[in-house]
Image (spheres, rainbow, N blue to C red):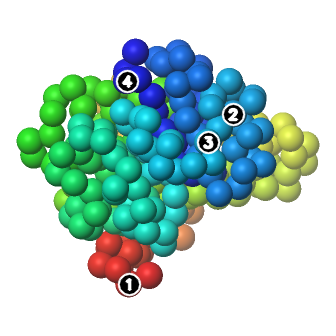
Amino acid sequence: MVCDKIAIIGIGNMGSALVKGIVRKGIIPSENIILYDTDSEKTEKLAEEIGATASFDLKEAVGSSGTVILCVKPNIVLNVAEEISSYLNKGTVVCSIAVGIPISRYREYISNECDFFRIMPNTPALVGEGMSVISFEEGTKKDSVERVLKIFSCAGKTQILDEKFMNQVTALTGSSPAYVFMMIEAMGNAGVKSGIPADVSYRLAAQAVLGSAKMVLESGLHPAVLKDRVCSPAGTTIEAVEALEKSNFRYALLEAMNRCTERAKEISGGKG
């Protein structure tokens, strides 16, 4: 058991995905998971579905939990941190998944007696294939780190990384599923244009992306090496690669990620 109770504050897509993963992995009895959200109907429905405990009292939810995970939007997360600050017990582990907000800003409200973690998850957590990047301060207790790793591994893979890279990680893993979805959509559209039924075309495109990603992860080879292995001399693939290069495919991705990172920095600096 990771801790006595885990409070999930905010049960949108990411909060719901995380709590369902925790229940699926069985690292803590489901009744020891406390759900809190301003939408009481949604809270009750999810709690009933997974056997968790719905709470409508933020003080009670936070005060009775050894781990508190803030799954709320960046524009309100500091307000929530301030609100829960007086309810936290000494030694409580606090996490936030809000983009852009550095740990130093939370420390304006969260006592140093609580270990604090900044997490950047992504939406594939909904299917148990998320990537959660985790940052924390020097001096954070080892058992707190192990606890957080175990919790977030319920939704997929985890990676510890220095906080100075978290804005870049927003573009690399947090927002990147959107780019991939766009690529799958475009590939599927091309298949439909050629006459392949839409449901088949999108499924084939998605599986191609899934299999390609798995090759990168399991082979350990550089993506360029794997790309070259698909390109036969004077073949079909090199024609497609040439067309992508002419369309600045790589540059478009680089520019998109740079824009995403800059926006994360703006949020970090309190500019919206």
Residue carrying label 4: 3
Q: 158 or 195, which is in the foreground?
A: 158
Q: Nearer the viewer, mark 2 or mark 1?
A: 2
Looking at marks 3 and 4 on the same chain, the residue that comes earlier in the sequence is marked by 4
Q: Which is more foreground, mark 3 or mark 2?
A: 3
Which of 101/250 is in front? 101
Residue labelled with disc 2: 47
C-alpha distance separating marks 3 and 1: 33 Å
Circles 3, 4 touching at the beta carbon (< 8 Å): no
How far across and how far down the image is residue 122, in percent? 50, 47
Q: Which residue is the extreme one toward the left?
A: 139
Q: Which residue is mark 1?
A: 271
Which of marks 1 and 3 precedes in the sequence? 3
Label 3 element class: strand
The quadrant the N terminus occupies is top left
Which callout, 3 or 4, points to the residue nearer the camera? 3
Q: CA distance from mark 2 to mark 1?
A: 36 Å
What's the distance in space between the residues labelled 3 and 2, CA to CA?
A: 9 Å
For badge 2, the amino acid type reads Ala
Amino acid identity at mark 3: Ser
Contact between marks 2 and 1 (CB within 8 A): the answer is no
Please state which amino acid type lies under the numbered disc 4: Cys
